[in-house]
Every structure is written in C-alpha cells, then in structure tokens.
Image (cartoon, rainbow, N blue to C red):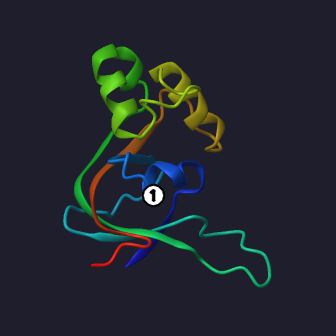
Amino acid sequence: MRNMSFALTTAQILNREKRVTRRMGWLNLKPGDRIRAVKKAMGLKKGESIEELAVLKVIDVRREPLDRMLDDRDYGFRECELEGFGKHPDYQWPSEFVQMFCGSHKGCTPASIVTRIEFEYESVRGEVA
C-alpha cells in the first residue's frame, strides 16, 4: 500500500469531508487500489515518523485539465465540496482552489492535466474497525 500525503487537507481527511483529491502524478493508480493517507510523507526530520490518517480505497481515477473546474462552474463548485473545501473560507470558489493547487505544485498551471482520484474511507485514525 502506497503512502499519499494530505498535509494541506489533514483536517478534511480526519473529518471525512474529502472524497476527491487531485495529484500531478499517480498515473498508474486504478479503482480498487488502497492508499495509506498520511499527514506528511517526505521531508521528515530526524526522529519524525509517518503519521497515518486513514486508509482509502480508490473508486475512480481519471486525467483531466485542472481548469475544467473553471470552465464548468457547477462542476467546479461540486468538486470543491468533494475536495473538502465547501465550507473552507479561503477556498470555496473554484478559482481560489485552482490558484491554491497551482501555488502548491511546482510547474502547475490551470491548463495542466492532473489526476483526479475519488475514494472512500476504509478506516480513519482512532477508529475501531
């Protein structure tokens, strides 16, 4: 099972508000794959360890232009909600989400093709299975 960092959306994962994530890579992911959602996967300081947040099961994976969220306003707002930002004061608008995403991914522009990953929760940290 591969680790996937959710450093920017830790609260949304723990609160189960997030059902979709976008990534610049992850080209070989497919429905049915399981992912270990972690707070931080790279750049750990000496003595730090990976903190598991949840185990996720991939439902759908597709490649699409990031600016689809801007071109289709209804789609953009639905996706912000699925990304866990429907109630976030800074990222409720698709344009704000796209700006944040591009700002946190080197080389990303609104026209970039990204991997959209839809998932369901198998478990969340602190949950008894």
Find residue 82 and report its image quarter.
Answer: top left
Give the image location of residue 94, x and y in percent.
45, 22
Find residue 57 and report its image quarter.
Answer: bottom left
**Count of numbered labels shown in the rendering:** 1
Instruction: Give the residue at x 60% y 33%.
Output: 100
Against 11, is 94 above or below? Answer: above
Instruction: Give the residue at x 40% y 68%.
Output: 54
Q: Quadrant of the N terminus?
A: bottom left
**Viewer-proximal residue among 84 and 105:** 84
In the picture as drawn, the residue positioned furthest to the bottom comes out as 47
Position of 75 with respect to 108 (left or right) is left
Q: Quadrant of the C terminus?
A: bottom left
Against 77, is 9 above or below? Answer: below
Against 83, is 12 above or below? Answer: below
Give the image location of residue 17, x and y in percent.
38, 45
Q: Which residue is mark 1?
A: 14
In the picture as drawn, the residue positioned furthest to the right comes out as 46
Q: Secondary structure at mark 1?
A: helix
Residue type, label 1:
Leu
Give the image location of residue 98, x and y in percent.
52, 28
**Viewer-proximal residue among 86 and 66:** 86
